Amino acid sequence: MGSYIARQPNGRLCRFSTIVDAVTHINLTEEDYIELCAERAREEARRDLEDKRFVKPFDRVLEDTRFDNMTYDEWLGYLKEMGYDEPELPFKPGDEVRLVNQADADMDGRRAVVERAYRNSRTSKIDVEIRFDDEQDATYMYNDSDLAKED
């Protein structure tokens, strides 16, 4: 647990540390306690911002974004507000596509709908997540060269 707060007999608060098994703060008002917690949160936030493992490159946001809880148009609005110019991608969510150039003849020509597309920061290729018409419970990743837009 680390610590807990107790109401003192005089109505104020004290903080008891279970690490050192002693009182560390006494006679706190509720506002004092809130400020104590806020300062700890500010210190933690400062440490997070200085930690290179915590702050990720923006490309990661582009790669991780899904459109389950927002529309593609909302996403474009957020990007614009954040100062990001959307790259021209050949596919957009909702586009109807078909697989092309597949070694497996059963897959070649199969139709699907684009869930999302983004430029992969590690490979510089455009990755496209699609959902096949007959498989609504799964999505699959393809390179843009494996897909063609339906007319």
Image (spheres, rainbow, N blue to C red):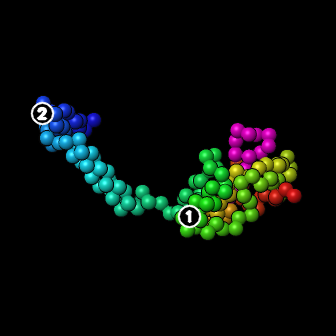
Which quadrant of the view contains residue 85?
A: bottom right
Pointer 2 residue: 10
Identity, as a three-letter code, of the amino acid under mark 1? Glu
Along the line of sight, which residue is nearer the eye, 103 or 2? 2
Q: Secondary structure at mark 2?
A: loop
- Residue 131 image position (x, y, % from top left): 74, 46
Q: Quadrant of the N terminus?
A: top left
Q: Is residue 85 above or below residue 137?
A: below
Q: Is residue 16 above or below residue 112?
A: above
- Residue 19, numbered label: none
The residue lying at 81 percent from left, 59 percent from top is: 148
Q: Is residue 5 above or below residue 39?
A: above
- Residue 68 within the segment the image draws in magenta: no
- Magenta region: 127-139
Q: Quadrant of the C terminus?
A: bottom right
- Residue 81, numbered label: 1
- Residue 81 image position (x, y, % from top left): 56, 64
| CB contact under 8 Å: marks 2 and 1 | no
Q: Earlier in the sequence, mark 2 or mark 1?
A: 2
- Residue 75 image position (x, y, % from top left): 62, 57
The residue lying at 83 percent from left, 49 percent from top is: 111
Mark 2 or mark 1, which is nearer to you? 2
